[in-house]
Image: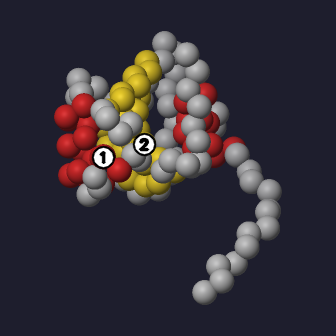
Amino acid sequence: MILSFSSRYRYFIYKLDCDMRKGFDGLSGLVESHFLMDPLQGDVFLFFNRPRNRVKILLWQGDGFLICHKRLEKGTFELPAGSLSNEITAQQVQFILEGIHLSSIKHRVRYKMKNAS
């Protein structure tokens, strides 16, 4: 099964070590206590274990939670530099799961429309 990540969702990464025994209630509790967010809003949350070779992805789908769990047989996941928890893009999620070095990615300058306020 191939997962695809869409820009219609917001993605949040939990950078502290997470106990991979946590299930739906434990992970949604971390969302409420750490992110101070409602896990039922449809955002996507990523949790990693201490060795960074496992990830759990939590998503509310309107009628229930979905958890995806990936275990690497070799290597580790690279987390983006920064604060203990932050929002990342769908593209960054894909890079993390595919093992692409985040520090070596360079974005070209693109036009951004200014907000009309």
Q: Please identify the quarter of the rendering in which residue 22 is found.
A: top left
Density class for disc 1 (Cα within 10 Å; few <14, some 14-19, many ≥20) is some
Q: Amino acid at mark 2?
A: Val
* Mark 2, secondary structure of its residue: strand
Question: What whole-number distance in Å separates the C-alpha atoms at marks 2 and 1?
Answer: 10 Å
- The structure residue drawn at horizontal position 55% and vertical position 49%, both measured from the top left corner, is 8
At 24% from the left and 27% from the top, the residue drawn is 23
Task: Tell me: residue 28, above or below residue 33.
Answer: above
Please tell me whether residue 3 is drawn above or below residue 108 in the rendered image: above
User: Toward the viewer: 17 or 70?
Assistant: 70
Q: Which quadrant holds the C terminus?
A: bottom right
Residue at the far bottom in the pictured view: 117
**Residue 56: percent from the left, percent from the top?**
38, 29
Residue projecting furthest to the front: 63
Quarter in which the N terminus is drawn: top right
What residue is disc 1 on? 40
Q: Quadrant of residue 57?
A: top left
Q: Residue 86, how many percent across, how many down?
A: 43, 55
Work out whether residue 43 or residue 46 is closer to the camera in this orientation and state it. Answer: 43
Q: Nearer the viewer, mark 2 or mark 1?
A: 1
Q: In this figure, which residue is indicated by the disc labeled 2?
A: 44
Q: Would residue 48 be visible to someone looking at this image? A: no
